[in-house]
Amino acid sequence: MSGVRVLVGTRKGAFVLASDGKRERWDVSGPHFAGWEIYHVKGSPADPNRLFASQTSGWFGQIIQRSDDGGKTWTQPGTPPGEPTTGPGGMPKGESNKFQYDSSSETGKPLTTHQFYDGTQHPWEFKRVWHIEPSLTDPDTVYAGVEDAALFRSNDGGKSWQELSGLRGHGTGPKWQPGAGGMCLHTIVLDPSNPERMFVAISAAGAFRSDDAGNTWRPINRGLKSQYIPDPEAEVGHCVHRIAMHRSRPGVLFMQKHWDVMRTDNAGDLWQEISGNLPTDFGFAIDVHAHEPETIYVVPIKSDGEHFPPDGKLRVYRSRSGGNEWEALTKGLPQRDCYVNVLRDAMAVDSLDKCGVYFGTTGGQVYASADAGDNWAPIVRDLPAVLSVEVQTLP
Amino acid sequence: MIRVVLPAHLRGLAHVSAEVELDIKGPATQRSVVDALEAKYPMLRGTVRDHVTQERRPFLRFFACEEDLSHESPDALLPDAVVSGKEPLLIVGAIAGG
């Protein structure tokens, strides 16, 4: 019987929630990496038992963990315990935790600074991995979006990482600036129909597209309007919070921006607003129904100053028309005195029939709906603040 | 033989439950101790000092014999009591946050 595995990253560890296809009873394992911030956990579509986790700490830096048995056991892929630390010839082995910006003379020179909070130029400094995106086809290939914003790729299962420096080097880097959460590359979307095409999003720089497998990039922010940017035609500087795609229509993207919910029908060449009747168009998370490419989900948050649902009511909003017309989904969700947030990477869908929808909150709840959002129930209520939620649909 | 006490998070990462013991070849300094620590426990690379700059992480401190050695040169000799194994070198995480 088919089942699902929900991968949850929290402020104090990772949790794996598993159920059969009914999605009524759940086994909870964890905390894995107790006490560490787990920004993201995601499985390989090419090998569902291969999971990658970003384990991070302001004290101890960045750790990449990998599991090859669906989350039961984990190792750092570059430095397994007990193995020699050097290879033939005495060269250091690949180190899975090492994210070094490209500083080569060919490409590194223009990549030295970005705009800081005070408007001055500031050097790039690696802080953590926000998002891990495994290849759709190769279990050894995986991408990492990091703070300060850059894109890295590993072709050896996470043992070693190389920057795709064409993103930082395409020319607008000195105009990028950190959002309140830092200057992070938090979204990586791979085009299932075209291995050369990929999308990323950065706060606060905007969205970018590559059509040559990540070597070169261009901003795709036309149509975005950001109140704090005086130039209505600004190429970069937009605080994109999240982008979602349905795999059957990779040219259609949906975006939750700092303010505004947007869509594009031409792979980002032009965006249009679809906020419609939402009670507020601020928010972080957005996702698309697994079987209905015009059905999308957001969780409206009151404002950038008040990161909680309007009126203390936790409501997912669903549009079945690709935006503009939204309905509130409330059954099973708290409708009073609720002041949690739902972060950008904390919503996901499974591909069962009916489509399951999941999201986690900063209050430690992970909610699931096994009927596309009509009814909700908590899988767990009291985890540490949830940073990310991913779902694997298992055969 | 040098004794090193790690913060709890790093003990978990290294799969050790108590202090670790390191054999140091040559002069015992902060640098040679961390070199030996990373060689014996490669999963700790990058956690005590930055991968690239090799500088101590800002929220970690080195203590021994009731003294803060954090701002000593990484190539300064450690106290005799640490070198002899009488006292451990303490790697301490700053108390901050939640």
Image (spheres, rainbow, N blue to C red):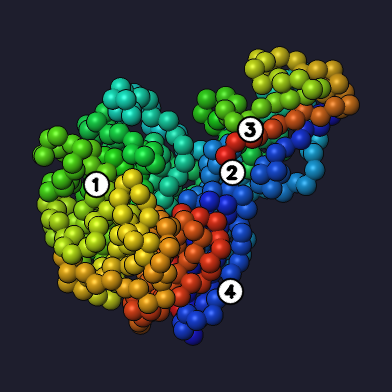
Q: State the residue position of label 2.
A: B98
- The Cα atoms of the two marked residues, 2 and 1, are separated by 33 Å
Q: State the residue position of label 1.
A: A207
Q: How crowded is mark 3: few (under 14 residues within 10 Å), some or many (20 or more)?
A: few
| Percent of width and height locating residue A128 | 47, 41
Label 2 with label 1: CB-CB less than 8 Å: no
Q: How crowded is mark 4: few (under 14 residues within 10 Å), some or many (20 or more)?
A: few
- The Cα atoms of the two marked residues, 2 and 4, are separated by 28 Å
Vertical placement of residue A373 versus A312, above or below: below
From the viewer's perspective, is the residue at label 2 or at label 1 nearer? 2
From the viewer's perspective, is the residue at label 1 or at label 3 nearer? 3
- Circle 4: element type: strand
| Percent of width and height locating residue A1 | 49, 85
Which amino acid lies under the numbered mark 3 shown in the image of this protein? Answer: Ala
Tell me which corner region of the image, top left, top right, bottom left or bottom right, holds residue A253.
bottom left
Vertical placement of residue A387 versus B18, above or below: below
| Same subunit, tags 1 and 3 | no
Residue B90 located left or right of residue B83: left
- The Cα atoms of the two marked residues, 4 and 3, are separated by 36 Å
